[in-house]
Image (tube, rainbow, N blue to C red):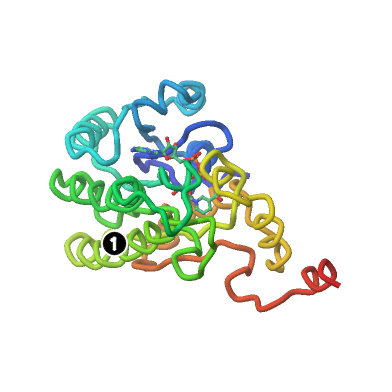
Amino acid sequence: MAYNLLKGKKGIIFGALDEKSIAWKVALKAKEEGAEFVLSNAPIALRMGAINELAAKCGSEVIPADATSMDDLENLFSKSTEILGGKLDFVLHSIGMSPNVRKGKDYNELNYDWMMKAIDISALSFHKVMAVAEKQDAMNEWGSILALSYIAAQRTFPDYSDMAQSKAVLESIARSYGERLGRLKNIRVNTISQSPTVTTAGSGIGGFDVFFDYADKLSPLGNASAESCADYCVAMFSDLTRMVTMQNLMHDGGFSTSGITQKLIDKLS
Ligand code: NAI
């Protein structure tokens, strides 16, 4: 059911790779709620992915951008405001990648160049996105900027490797830039810490099936799906959440505050 929550709002959605992607679901939901937006992803992902299919459904243009490249981001933001005919009200950063995770490196054998790459792609790119938006004055007052995070920023999940550091940096950037953009332009900046979700990035983590099941059982509501994450993102882009900023918002069915649950006891007994 649609509520027209984003009627008249314009934005950029990063990170829709295929129909499992969280950003894909956010795009469909944002469209349903009346938003207009540009879709962006890394040039290589555009070649591999199915983003044109999503673009057709959403009536959106696709503009490639490697989120670590200031030049690409400058081009993306200036073209987006031109195409959409005005400033932006929302931005979704749904981007993550770690070469060390992809290649299954043990934590004591991390390749540091790859680690820097993971932090650049998964965290610093969020700073770059906001720096370009600020420089171009591309956002409207009371706009909303969101990135997706994971609880490995606070707790240890061994196979999450250097993505844990990336997410900790990402959440910290949301606070620091949130202070700045709030003060300058009443723009809010938050991260949503999502349950494990079956996507290309998610399933690339070693032991994913086991911790997906464990998280599901340790969450009174069960794992939050990508669809419900999209609902939350839409709520965060809407005018109903104007005073929420500089937060890491847990969207995890209760996982983060559960010690043990009956479901887990039943499984372990
Ligand atoms: P996904 O694999 O569908 O999305 C990741 C996206 O990052 C892809 O579209 C990929 O092309 C993009 N990307 C990678 N390098 C890039 C670059 N240099 N420039 C621009 N884009 C680039 O997977 P998913 O799960 O939808 O991931 C979205 C976000 O959600 C990520 O930040 C991820 O860490 C986060 N997240 C995912 C969870 C999961 O279990 N799937 C749990 C909690 C958070």
Residue at 47 percent across and 47 percent down: it is 101
Percent across and percent down for residue 137 are 16, 47
Residue at 42 percent across and 21 percent down: it is 47
Give the residue pinned by disc 1.
173
Relative height, residue 184 to residue 134 (above, below): below
Relative height, residue 44 to residue 24 (above, below): above
Question: Which residue sits furthest front?
Answer: 109
Question: Which residue sits furthest bottom?
Answer: 259
Looking at the image, residue 224 sits to the left or right of residue 151; the answer is right
Looking at the image, residue 193 sits to the left or right of residue 72; the answer is right
Looking at the image, residue 241 sits to the left or right of residue 175; the answer is right
Give the secondary structure at mark 1.
helix
Residue 63, quarter of picture: top left
Q: Is residue 33 visible?
A: no
Relative height, residue 125 to residue 47 (above, below): below
Residue 200, quarter of picture: top right
Quadrant of the frame with the N terminus: top right
